[in-house]
Image (cartoon, grey):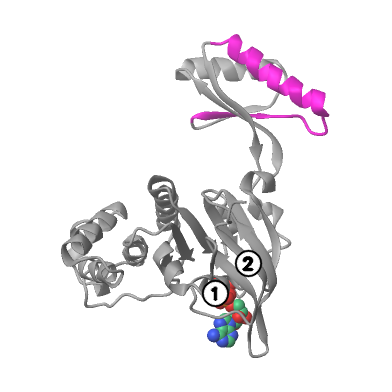
């Protein structure tokens, strides 16, 4: 039997009268997992229990088979943690801070310095790494927090709201960096956010919690809904794509160009045969014009819409 990456069984945590986690049972597999819930749902409490910072009131949890109460040292070696809130000393440079964190993990001086340079390069901090962190933008500070989480070469990264405080562009950059980090370093990532829409883009699985209880835990693909739009990607120059669009329209379907792609509407209320017919029309139109068909699939709706009620 394979040991799950993370497993929680009947996990409960109370703070006085507040029940932050309420008999939560969930397992998480390798890959990138999104932990989603509204503010106060219990995300940070779960993360802190997994890290051994907070004890469960009852129930149990494990990280790669290690118990969160008994095996804290082993878990610390395996996990890199990016906390939600600011934690960077303003008068230290990123290089000094990340090297120091590497030393805390047991690396000798030279190796710590080299490793710090490596992870700071990975997160995209170059010349700025020698400046005091007090002058950093929120985006730069988030990158340093990610770098320090990676410095001891962990097997799992736990990121608590890494996009907090960032503007839309900064969020996109941070999400791309998290995704790249997971895939390039070949490590698993647990990333929390109260924004479902942004996590569905980079996660393999989503764990949704509400008021300390598990709502759903599923593959992202299984959670999204198929819409009545076919997304078509073509290989061909602009006149050839125009030709394709005209061919689809001539066969009676609504069609529009969207940058590199063409969107074809499947008529409403058609059965499976009608959906198949729309696919056939796209293939026939491609064959009748000077384009290659690179991709043809139903567009998936956003998780945000699916959970709009549950996660309000
Ligand atoms: N140290 C504490 N003392 C008392 N109550 C706490 C403490 N930490 C968390 N709580 C309460 O437990 C509940 C869950 O909080 P938690 O921080 O885990 O949620 P969250 O999903 O991470 O939300 P946020 O994104 O706002 O941090 C909330 O009602 C919160 O007020």
Whether tag 2 and tag 1 are in contact, CB under 8 A, the answer is: yes
Circle 1 SS class: helix
The residue drawn where x is 67% and y is 68% is 9
The residue drawn where x is 62% and y is 69% is 38
- In the rendered structure, the answer to whether residue 125 lies left or right of residue 277 reads left
The residue drawn where x is 49% and y is 76% is 52
Circle 2 SS class: strand
Q: Which contiguous range is marked in magenta?
A: 260-289
Tell me residue 158's x, y (percent): 47, 63
- In the rendered structure, the answer to whether residue 186 lies left or right of residue 257 reads left
Above-or-below relation of 148 to 89: above
**Mark drawn on residue 49:** 1
Q: Is residue 83 part of the magenta span, yes or no?
A: no
Above-or-below relation of 302 to 39: above
Tell me residue 65's x, y (percent): 55, 62
Query: Mark 2 highlights which residue?
Result: 8
**As drawn, which residue projects farthest toward the bottom?**
16
Above-or-below relation of 70 to 224: below
Locate the C terminus and report the quarter of the image it occupies.
Answer: bottom right
Q: Which mark is first along the chain, 1 or 2?
A: 2
Ligand 1 sits in quadrant: bottom right
Q: Is residue 270 part of the magenta span, yes or no?
A: yes
- In the rendered structure, the answer to whether residue 293 lies left or right of residue 156 reads right
User: Within 10 Å of the Cα at label 1, are there few (<14), some (14-19), or many (20+) other Cα atoms?
Assistant: many
The residue drawn where x is 70% and y is 53% is 306
Tell me residue 127's x, y (percent): 18, 58
Beta carbon at label 2 within 8 Å of ligand 1: no
Tell me residue 70's x, y (percent): 52, 75
């Amino acid at each position: 039997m394979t040991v799950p990456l993370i497993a929680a069984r009947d996990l409960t945590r109370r703070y006085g009268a507040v029940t932050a986690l309420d008999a939560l049972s969930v397992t998480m597999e390798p890959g990138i997992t999104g932990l989603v819930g509204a503010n106060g749902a219990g995300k940070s409490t779960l993360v802190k229990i997994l890290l051994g910072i907070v004890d469960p009131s009852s129930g149990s949890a494990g990280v790669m088979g290690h118990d969160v109460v008994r095996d804290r040292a082993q878990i610390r070696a395996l996990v890199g943690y990016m906390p939600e809130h600011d934690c960077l000393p303003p008068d230290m440079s990123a290089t000094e801070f990340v090297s120091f964190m590497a030393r805390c993990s047991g690396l000798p001086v030279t190796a710590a310095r080299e490793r710090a340079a490596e992870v700071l390069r990975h997160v995209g901090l170059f010349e700025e790494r020698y400046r005091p962190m007090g002058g950093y933008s929120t985006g730069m500070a988030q990158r340093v927090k990610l770098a320090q989480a990676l410095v001891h070469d962990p097997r799992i990264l736990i990121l608590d709201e890494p996009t907090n405080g960032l503007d839309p562009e900064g969020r996109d950059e941070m999400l791309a960096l998290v995704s790249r980090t997971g895939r390039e370093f070949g490590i698993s990532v647990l990333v929390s956010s109260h924004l479902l829409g942004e996590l569905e883009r980079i996660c393999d699985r989503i764990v949704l919690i509400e008021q300390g209880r598990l709502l759903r835990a599923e593959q992202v693909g299984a959670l999204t809904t198929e819409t009545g739009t076919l997304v078509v990607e073509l290989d061909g120059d602009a006149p050839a794509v125009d030709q394709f669009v005209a061919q689809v329209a001539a066969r009676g379907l609504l069609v529009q160009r969207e940058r590199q792609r063409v969107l074809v509407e499947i008529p409403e209320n058609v059965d499976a045969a009608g959906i198949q017919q729309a696919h056939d029309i796209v293939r026939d139109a491609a064959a009748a014009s000077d384009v290659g068909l690179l991709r043809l699939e139903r567009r998936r709706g956003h998780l945000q819409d699916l959970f709009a009620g549950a996660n309000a």
